[in-house]
Image (cartoon, helix red, strand yellow):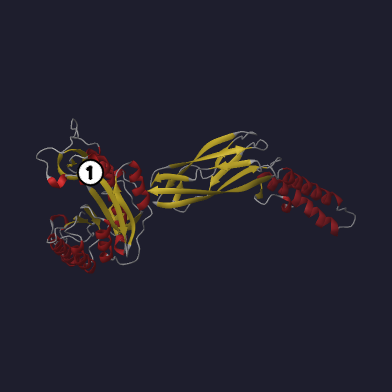
Amino acid sequence: MIFFLPAAMRPVPNIPLLWITLVVVVPASGWVVYAAGAPGLSVFPGVAALLLFFLIVVLDLLRSSSRLAGLSVTVPDLLRCTKGRELAVPVTLANAGATLPSLRYGIATPSDFRAAGELVARITTLERGKARSLEYPFLPLRRGRFFLESLHVETPSRWGLWLLRKRFPLATEVRVYPDLRAERKRLAGLFLLRGNDGNRAVRQVGKGRDFEKLRDYQPGDDYIDIDWKATARRQRPVTRTYQMERTQEIYVVVDHSRLSAREIRVGVEKATEGDWLYREDSAGGEHLVTTQLEKFLQCSLLLASVAERQGDLFGFISFADKEDRFLRARNGKDHYNLVRDALYTLEPKPVAPDFEQLMIALRQRLTRRALLVMLIDLSDPLTAEQFHAALPLIHRQHLVLVNMVRPEKAVPLFSPKHLPAGVSQVYEQLGGHFQWQELRETANRLRHLGVELGVPE
């Protein structure tokens, strides 16, 4: 009987049908079996009851087969949200068919999403020719790019014996960006520009490199500032004037090779809101765990926000075994959105970084002196040596700063905050002391090239 239904329709028995089956079909079937073996008893009452039951069930299903044919679903093609913040997906249900007395609907959620409300939502009545605008709340648990693939609806048949279900395919892209709430709170004074009230921008005129205008030659002007083409056109000497550079180019260079996947564990009592991936229970108690790459991306977005407020030009570069994303330094809200879209899908790659290829690309692409903030893990001695060997390609051309998150155990032995409780812990902390010493030596070698290495905890 299901062959007469639309291909997208899937009927399932409703609770009244199950009760009728229990009350009618089971006794009638028992009567037919019993009467067939007992002389003098007719099987007709049982067969008649079964035929009547199947007739009613089939008629209800056939009369309701087009009940959802006039229903249409509209969901935006693109949604943007922040990890850990509720996302309300706008859903529009339009009914061009018969009035639906009740309707249940739900969206198939990706594994990295959690329903923030009811998993299956309900509306009471959807009248003919009407549309309802609804919201389906989600809670994204991880940054990245996801897709909502289908929305499922369900309504009872005309006599309530069946539940008619239909799947509507979706092609909604959901972009989940890193959560910056904790970092913005720490930098609230900077973001609010406190202490700058009453200040105003003043144009600085001088021997800068930014062209300002052309004007007639005046006694005392330097001959090298004369624009000879403009002089020939105007038939009189014309001088170029310049102004001091009011903006600087800032590039964040993010390494997402294998070392960027190093986990960062923070005790729950010390942790603040942020881009944590999961919790874990260990010998040291409960911890929140994230990766170094998550911190790199948070830092990149914060620097982009600060540069936008200060009027500087901000660019973004990511690399692993090769440079894979490059955004030329610019300013403005649209450019910030481009940077955000470029980094939110970055994931660690199980490859070693190629610093020589990166430095060659930077030297070729960046012709103007810029501030390069490199977010690179140099805790591995071989990686640090390769980075140091490649730096001479750019360290004179640009101002370079290197930052990484200090490994959890990389602290000096007998430091005040990490005093060993016994002899056994001395040996445990000795490996961390050697790692801390290697980072200090790396920082000293980089400082000879004019490069500062920051290793915050």
User: Going by the picture, which residue comes out furthest to the top?
Assistant: 198
User: Going by the picture, which residue comes out furthest to the bottom?
Assistant: 382
Asked if one can make out residue 355 in the rendered structure from this viewpoint, the answer is yes
Place of residue 74 in the rendered image (x, y in percent of width and height, measured from the top left) = 55, 42
Q: Residue at x 27, y 42 (%)?
A: 308
| Residue 346 found in image quarter | bottom left
Say what amino acid the circle numbered 1 marks: Ala
Q: Which residue is mark 1?
A: 232
Answer above or below: position of 193 versus 399: above
User: Going by the picture, which residue comes out furthest to the left?
Assistant: 220
Q: Residues within 10 Å of mark 1 (few under 14, many from 20)?
A: few
Q: Nearer the viewer, residue 355 or 240?
A: 240
Q: Nearer the viewer, residue 236 or 425?
A: 236
Secondary structure beneath dot 1 equals helix
State the quadrant of the C terminus.
bottom left
Q: Nearer the viewer, residue 37 or 143?
A: 143
Place of residue 122 in the rendered image (x, y in percent of width and height, measured from the top left) = 56, 39
Place of residue 172 in the rendered image (x, y in percent of width and height, measured from the top left) = 50, 48
Residue 408 placement, left or right of 35: left
Answer above or below: position of 43 versus 305: below
Place of residue 28 in the rendered image (x, y in percent of width and height, measured from the top left) = 79, 51
| Residue 130 found in image quarter | top right
User: Going by the picture, which residue comes out furthest to the right?
Assistant: 40
Residue 181 placement, left or right of 235: right
Residue 410 placement, left or right of 325: left
Q: Residue at x 36, y 48 (%)?
A: 338
Asked if one can make out residue 425 in the rendered structure from this viewpoint, the answer is no
Q: How many marks?
A: 1
Q: Residue at x 64, y 50 (%)?
A: 8
